[in-house]
Amino acid sequence: MDTVYSVYIVRCADNTYYTGIAADVDRRIIEHECSPRGAKYLKGRGPLTLVYSKAAGDRSVASQVEYRIKQLSRAAKRALIDGRATLSELIADQDSAAG
């Protein structure tokens, strides 16, 4: 059985966002907060709040989705988090703006 990866966004205590992928998002958030395996960016930025998570597929697809989210403006990420826009809409907007 193939592992399903999710893409997630956490809000840090300093109100910045961090986007990542994981097969087990809850475990990964704990690693970010309590383990040396957490992302360097998040060191000292806790507590972390999971604000968005969505299954993306295999690791390759999840990495591509993560990259696209990281390219979004803060306002677009906020729209995604708040449910005012879907990931598909935001990626389509990115594509039309780029080309």
Image (cartoon, helix red, strand yellow):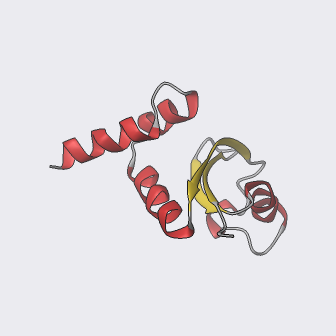
Position of residue 82 measured from the top left corner of the image (x, y, whole percent): 56, 28
* Residue in front for this viewpoint, 97 or 18: 97
* Residue in front for this viewpoint, 14 or 21: 21
Looking at this rendering, what residue extends furthest in the front direction? 1
Q: Is residue 22 left or right of residue 69?
A: right
Position of residue 23 measured from the top left corner of the image (x, y, whole percent): 69, 63
Query: Which of the image's four quarters has the N terminus?
Result: bottom right
The relative height of residue 36 versus residue 87 in the rendered view (above or below) is below
Residue that appears at 67% across and 47% down: 12
Position of residue 89 measured from the top left corner of the image (x, y, whole percent): 37, 35
Position of residue 49 measured from the top left corner of the image (x, y, whole percent): 73, 43
Residue that appears at 73% across and 59% down: 44
Q: Is residue 7 left or right of residue 32?
A: left
Looking at this rendering, what residue extends furthest in the left direction? 99
**Splitting the image into 4 quarters, where does residue 93 fall?**
top left
Looking at this rendering, what residue extends furthest in the top direction? 84
**Splitting the image into 4 quarters, where does residue 29 fall?**
bottom right
